[in-house]
Image: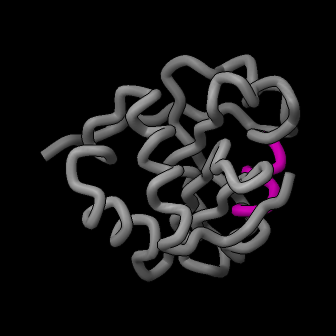
Amino acid sequence: MRYERYQRVFLEGVIDICIEQGWQSYSADIERTHRALTAPGVTTVVAVDEGTVCGFAQVQSDGEIQAHLSVLTVKGSYRRRGVGSELIAQSFRASGGIRLDLVTEDAQGFYESMYHSLKSGFRIYP
């Protein structure tokens, strides 16, 4: 398993994972997804196993203090192997932030296993 900064060569594998997750906002327009994963202030790291993208993490950061884990996903067959934890560690470190905030709907147990401080939050839509 290797972990690398996202490059366009990984786009198809990332899209496959998004389709597996049912994430239409990422799979509907692959050019938009590529722009999102490479936007200013964004750090995206992919996990690659023998040429197969098996997970990715996207962190948005000011590069100094704030960082936000926007996306973390791992293919089902690669879960429970430490891939998600390593994606978080590498993308957080590369982002330059000193704290990482995130929102989760169904992975509380995973994040609670890490050193953390629980905060209340909101997701606001236009």
Residue sitting at the far front: 50
Residue shown at 64%/50% (left/top)?
53
Above or below residue 10? Residue 39 is below
Residue drawn 34% across the image and 71% down it: 35
Image colouring: one colour
Q: Which residue is pictured at 50% across the width and 38% down the height?
A: 17
Q: Nearer the viewer, residue 85 or 14?
A: 14
Q: Residue at x 36, y 27 (%)?
A: 22
- Answer left or right for 70 relative to 95: left
- The stretch in magenta equals 85-91
What count of labels does the image hold? 0
In the displayed structure, 26 sits above or below 114; it is below
Q: Position of residue 60 (x, y in %)?
A: 51, 65
Asked if the magenta segment contains residue 90, the reply would be yes
**Residue 32, horizontal then vertical, whole percent:** 26, 63
Kindly report the secondary structure that dominates the magenta region of the rendered protein. helix
Outermost residue to the left = 126
x and y percentages locating residue 9 in the rendered image? 53, 70
Is residue 115 found left or right of 93 in the rendered image?
Answer: right
Tell me if residue 6 is in the magenta stretch: no
The spot of residue 50 in percent (x, y) is: 79, 52
